[in-house]
Image (cartoon, coloured by chain):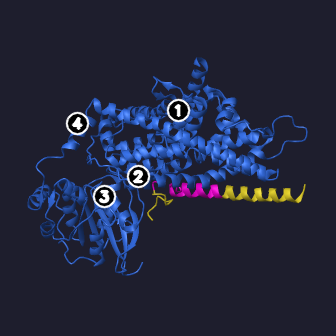
Chain colours: A blue, B yellow
Amino acid sequence: MSEATLRIALVGNPNCGKTALFNQLTGARQKVANYAGVTVERKEGRFTAPSGRAIRLLDLPGAYSFESTSPDERITRDVLLGHYPGEAVPDMIVCVADATNLRLHLRFVLEVKRLGRPMVLALNMMDAARHRGIRIDVAELERQLGMPVVQTVAVRRGGARALVDLVDKGIPSLTPQPAAMDESADLHAEVRALLRATVTMPHASDKVVDAIDRWTLHPVIGPIILAAVMFLVFQAVYSLGKPMTDAIGDGFDSLSAIVGAGLPAGPLRGLICDGVLSGVGTVLGFLPEILVLFLFILLLEESGYLPRAAFLLDRLMVSVGLTGRSFIPLLSSFACAIPGIIGTRSITDPRDRWATILVAPLMTCSARLPVYALLIGAFIPTTKVWGLFNLQGLTLFALYMLGIVGAMVVGWVAKRLGRDQREHALLMELPAYRLPNARDVALGLWERGAIFLRRLTGVILALTVVMWFIATFPSPPVGATGPAIDYSFAGMLGRALQHVFEPLGFNWQITLSLIPAFAARETAVATLATVYAVGNNADVGTLGQVLTGHFSLASALSLMVWFAFAPQCMSTLAVIRRETGSWRKVVLSFSYMFIVAYVLAFATYHLAGALL
Amino acid sequence: MNHGLWIQYAIIGALVVVCVVYVARKLRASAKSGGCAGGCGSCGGCGSNSPH
């Protein structure tokens, strides 16, 4: 690194906009949301100031105090104190504070100031503060704090210009004097004095927010609103996503027919039509449903409603051995269990953290959505319930609820089996409601789509080629009478493993699809598409239509339940090992999910077989 | 077997080897770093959970 490179650390309370500022300055796309605890790791980026000065920027997890004990807050403390391995003390600290909530944020500013390091205070969300009638005497605040103070709006283009201009000048001459970290010092009194001298608050509180909160946080109406919101989201996934999914499926069928007609007969045509186009095309068809789901999750994230949901569910979560702090990691797990498990670093108590890691994979990750969508589309009729709700949407909602209820039961059992049965109260900041920013939502959707396509054209495509190969070779021996696929490696492997999964109603094709699903869940769909495409010489319609001819409704329900509880994918197991540092916990986590999935899928198959 | 068919088998063989190596490398990297190899989006899509 060049001598002239300035190393700057972004610090501040959670949800003050550090990561939005980091993204604005460096052009990165780290995840931001309207709730605390999104950043749990130290992130690094670089940018060049207008003068050509190179700047290395560190985005640190939000912290309320240096006395905190959660793993993410420890990173911030260690970096600032120079105790973080391999990381020198930053040349300058940019302490970010939410201008609409200085009563809370200034306390940490004062704590950081005592380090006596060159420091700048960035008053973020100044537009929202002005909108609410909060007036801040920036010059007086600068004088009283003894450090430069700049105003920023991290979510607006050019909203960090004042900060860039300041850091471009190098280390500020106005540097606070170091002071003893005296725990007994009354920082709150100091904050109050600062607020009296520099901030004028509006007389009336935000009436709109209060009015909305009266409904959304109501002990009876609040949970009803939450259930209704979730219910509508899953109805929308089917109502809005299905037509586009069907269109993509039809498009790939036509493409496959055109390519098939244009290529000479031979194994290469089989690979392209039965393997790549059939397998990857089927998975790609579920992209619209995934995007619709994420559209709603992003809207809820941006609006500020989600922390209210965590607040509402706190009592329920504590009663089942989790904590309200588990809510955000569990919510992240609906995208993928990996960020959820990493997100548990914001949970201070080790028992609560382990319980959350244990149940995070039970939240339905987006990789499972194509499996559910395929089976629901094939086996559940499109009838209306009470003339209003789509039965397919209801089934999807039920599968998501199955994971949530399963997580609560597992949490409860873990709490009963554990020695430590204390309950930990939740203390969290409820952010202001805000209208979702269309650009942020569009960017979030674009990223989800790009991630899905990268997965599809990477691991899923590669696994599909391998699955096609083992489903095609070796060729049947001379005089063979059965279908060719029965003599292939896939046929042999599927049949060998079928004994384990036969009690769940799985045929050898389903059993085979579970193997690559261990690497990426969506590959189960691609494998079924490939295996049935190779096995059927005649065109028998979409994969859904093929499946209805090959296994029963009881088997389909059993497979859905299996995927609701199925053991984690390999990457999730790896991240559990990294976060817990224990192979024993990896084995425990994998084993309990395998047993639960097996038992419940078995029960579903036999119950559905008897009743339907 | 004609030449064309041999070429097709050679292409498929090479492709399968490349795919197997690719998947193995991806999974190995993922297991070593405890990351999702770009699939989960926790990294903002950069493909690494480690500081970068």
Per the image, the residue denoted by label 1 is A596
The amino acid sitting under disc 2 is Val
Q: In which chain is the residue bearing label 2?
A: A
Q: Is residue B29 magenta?
A: yes
What residue sits right under mark 2 in the picture? A441
> Which residue has dot 3 on it?
A17
Please tell me whether residue B35 belongs to the stretch shown in magenta.
yes
Q: Quadrant of the N terminus of chain A?
A: bottom left
Give, as a three-letter code, the residue at label 1.
Answer: Val
N-terminal of the two: label 2 or label 4? 4
Q: Which residues are magenta?
A: B22-42
- For the residues marked 3 and 4, what is the alpha-carbon distance in whole angstroms? 26 Å
The one of A158 and A563 positioned closer to us in this rendering = A158
Q: Amino acid at mark 3?
A: Gly
Q: Residue furthest top?
A: A611
Which residue matches tag 4? Answer: A214
Rendering coords of residue A178 (x, y %): 19, 70
Q: Amino acid at mark 4?
A: Arg
Which residue: 48% across, 30% down? Answer: A394
Element on which disc 3 rests? loop
Q: Nearer the viewer, mark 3 or mark 1?
A: 3
Give me the C-alpha separation between circle 3 and circle 2. 16 Å
Q: CA distance from mark 2 to mark 4?
A: 27 Å
Q: CA distance from mark 3 to mark 1?
A: 41 Å
